[in-house]
Amino acid sequence: MQFNRSLQLFERAQKSIPGGVNSPVRAFKSVDTHPLFIEKGKGSKIYDIDGNEFIDYVGSWGPLILGHCHEKIISAVENALHSGTSFGAPTEGEIQLAEMVKEAVPSIEMLRLVNSGGEATMGAIRVARGFTGRDKIIKFEGCYHGSIDSLLVQAGSGATTLGKPDSEGVPQAFVDLTLLARFNDFDSVSELVDLHPQEIAAIIVEPVPGNMGMILPEHGFLQNLRSLCDREGIVLIFDEVMSGFRVDYGGVQALLNVQPDMTTFGKVIGGGFPVGGYGGRQDIMLQVAPVGPVYQAGTLSGNPIAVTAGIATLELLKEKGVYDEISQKSSWLVNETKSLCEKAGIPIQGNQMGGMFGFFFSETPVRDYQDALKTDVNRFKKFFNQMLRQGIYIAPSAFETFFVSTAHTDEDLEKTAAAIKQALAHL
Ligand SMILES: *Cc1c(COP(=O)(O)O)cnc(C)c1O
């Protein structure tokens, strides 16, 4: 496989864009290689600028649950374009998308649309602070909630991959308001709440973390957070930017039957366009301007083209059997990988929920960020490069999650399993 043109473009990109990329993980630094410049995508495949074909398990980092260039989304967007691309005034599509989210996710009574997942978590935190009149928040080590000052503390994937859990430029004053607990360790949360009585505005959590690799919540963990928040008047925020409409049409909260006070969305609800959203209980959401005192705004928020793509995506996802189908595909891949690893004598842990799945090269189960950091990252690097050379595009980090789409075929899955077998022989 030749990457000459990607290498040339990468050289050129680095002269005008920091690191040549507009989001750090795209640089492939943590797998000791260079990014591929993508020319096009169709269904389950992407094609780089050198003409190489890959089966894609990144799916733009989660949004493309229907694969690339789904015809119904493309034609909905094409039609919408002729009516104008942005007005900065309300359009009917925004109501429709909000109504669809409410119908899908019962804890949502009201929703505000924004342009990205990070913008959604930023809005949710601000509203929770305004609603409670408290400043401190609790987040979990290794959970990522976007490139937001108060949340860039031990923030998993991108930051972890670069070995810099905290970012320069985030004032200590912000970090001081962000308390860190350990995922799957309820005592670490209740201790913080006891230490800071009446000071915690919100607990924000990825209910199924996907940004320190994929980790599952242990039985009772999310329910315990729910009871604690009820008792202490703390706003429980589920960051379902990745898991929303990905593990199930109603997100993790529907599958595990735990209702947060607020939820953030992104990725899938934009159907490949920049859309995010935050919502939840009506009494909390009525704090948001122009009805309430918490200001939050956006020139392109609720953009008609992006909203059209979101609606078309949710309409397709609502059809019967979609989540069974992607669940079967991802669990097949996980089971196949586990048994191939077993035969090869390579210790592995695998997790899966709906259309997301992940692996750790580890002897022992991974329940939190500290466990994730102890896994065999060097082995992952080799694995990644072996897979790439065989035309399988997975996330370039040991701390990311993989995604399947409705477009992945049985043939794709078989090819992937064969590539895994081959890759394991080189580890
Ligand atoms: C991707 C992600 C975000 C950030 O979304 P952006 O659209 O990249 O800003 C926030 N939270 C979670 C859980 C995510 O996976």
Image: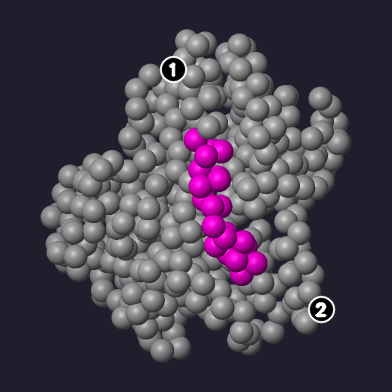
Whole-percent x and y of residue 128? 33, 70
Whole-percent x and y of residue 192? 19, 52
Question: Quadrant of residue 74 in the image?
Answer: bottom right
Position of 330 relative to 150 (above/below): above
Q: Give the range drawn in magenta.
A: 310-331
Note whether residue 88 is visible. Answer: yes
Kindly identify the amino acid type of the residue bearing the numbered disc 2: His
- Identified at 28% across, 66% down, the residue is 235
Q: Quadrant of the C terminus?
A: top right
For label 1, the residue is: 347
Note whether residue 32 is visible. Answer: no
Q: In this figure, what is the number of numbered marks?
A: 2
Q: Is mark 2 within 8 Å of ligand 1?
A: no
Position of 101 relative to 251 (above/below): below
For label 2, the residue is: 82
Position of 401 relative to 237 (above/below): above
- SS under mark 1: loop
Alpha-carbon span between mark 1 and mark 2: 54 Å
Q: Quadrant of the N terminus?
A: top right
Whole-percent x and y of residue 110? 42, 77
Taking depth in this image into account, of 417 and 4 the one nearest to the observer is 417
